[in-house]
Amino acid sequence: MINVGIESMNVYAGSAFLDVNKLALHRQLDTKRFVNLMMKEKAVAMPFEDPISFGVNAAKPIVDKLSEEEKQKIELLITCTESGIDFGKSISTYIHKYLNLSKNCRMMEIKQACYSGTIGFQMAVNFILSNTSPGAKALVIASDISRFMIVPGISLEEQDWSFAEPSGGAGAVAMLVSDSPHVFQLDQGASGYYGYEIMDTCRPVTDGEAGDVDMSLLAYLDCCENAFLEYQKRVIGASYRDSFQYLTFHTPFGGMVKGAHRTMMRKMLKAAPSDIENDFNERVVPGLSYCQRVGNIMGATVFLSLLSTIEKGTFERAKRIGCFSYGSGCCSEFYSGVVTPAGQKYVQQYNIERQLDQRYELSMSEYDELLKGSDTIKFGTRDIQLNLDRVPEIISTDQSERLILTNITNFHRNYKWIT
């Protein structure tokens, strides 16, 4: 049997971030209620950053570590996003160009809200398992941004997107999928998926989001339960408590995950409150660390949580991780895989914590000023020359080589590398 899973993975969370507790005070939010979000920071997409630059910057360190022969084996590039820039042209074409991948490569884009990253990963897995091109690899990049557009005449606190502002992040996770799953070996066939039509959150216009927060929470809880029950049908004897040493979730914000885990422990095990709290701290909290510093990055979030679990967990031996992925609209999946001590070392080589520490912290005035100009690079922008000196400290942050957007000419996006 062919082993399959993630050979290597990395995250890119941008050049700048915002302290969400300062945002709560600035927006005069109920700070007691805000604590339940379990958020610390959120990545903020600068005008010169978009899902393409995020995706390239996440994938480049992975691609750079490959030999030329290994690089030529990438025969499938899947981008997963709800932040696309064109109704027809996939962002995978731009990413393919700036990563300098082989022209003998399939390129495509998937949209399914926050579930997109998981379905992209599973499609790549099945490509490898088909063995139609022995030794081939697939590059899966989930990349999303939250770029809020101000409606004139309405205060910032009353904008339609105000409910999502504290947790809406920006970032990308790149995964090299192959038959050498050094980081995460997927349990083949161990997947329970569940979905139906619902209008919990959506993007009915190109630059706006609508939703019902309460409906979304209920759908998330419903899907978590039923996706796991389907997993149990396919994996006889599977136990929510005993089968997984760690659990990783799609994490719009930490409080939502804590509520889902509490519900599952009650329904599946009739666990006492103290047992639930202890189990949450032991098996779930490691996966929240990076999500608390980046925010919700849609299709990439469950893999950001997986990265966090691998980095922050204890792997003195091989351990199984249960993963729950949810996308509004809705579709969900519960699946699992195994991580070894060597897998943790593979992830650690990308110094993710250091990358997060090096970002520039925006002041509230700088952040509000960015919001005022966010419509200049909205979906469908035909021509623009970006002012890269708007916040010069961000360009000069001590980060490794990265790609930024410089201008759009007749709808075509142009980028350059900076160090």
Image (cartoon, rainbow, N blue to C red):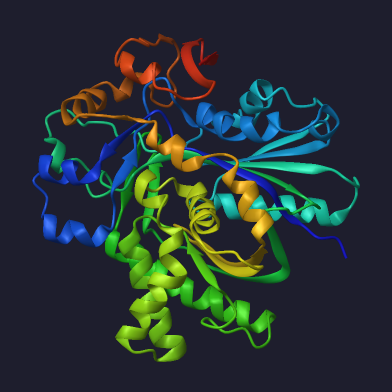
Is residue 151 shown to the viewer in this render? yes
Could you say where residue 319 lies in the image, as x and y percent from the top left? 62, 69
Is residue 86 shown to the viewer in this render? no
Q: Judge whether 414 appears above or below 169 on screen.
A: above
> Going by the image, does 122 lie left or right of 205?
right
- How many numbered markers are drawn? 0
Quadrant in which residue 23 is drawn: top left
Could you say where residue 350 lies in the image, as x and y percent from the top left? 57, 39
Question: Which is more toward the observer, 299 or 69?
Answer: 69
Could you say where residue 334 lies in the image, as x and y percent from the top left? 57, 69
Q: Judge whether 153 appears above or below 11 on screen.
A: above
Q: Residue at x 54, y 64 (%)?
A: 314
**The N terminus: image quadrant:** bottom right
> Going by the image, does 94 lie left or right of 221?
right
Could you say where residue 119 lies in the image, as x and y percent from the top left? 62, 54
Q: Judge whether 366 appears above or below 171 on screen.
A: above
Question: Which is more toward the observer, 206 or 147?
Answer: 147
Q: Residue at x 42, y 20 (%)?
A: 48
> Going by the image, does 383 lie left or right of 314?
left
Q: Residue at x 77, y 56 (%)?
A: 126
Quadrant in which residue 141 is drawn: top right
View extreme (left): residue: 28
View extreme (front): residue: 316
> Going by the image, does 159 lie left or right of 387?
left
Q: Residue at x 56, y 35 (%)?
A: 58
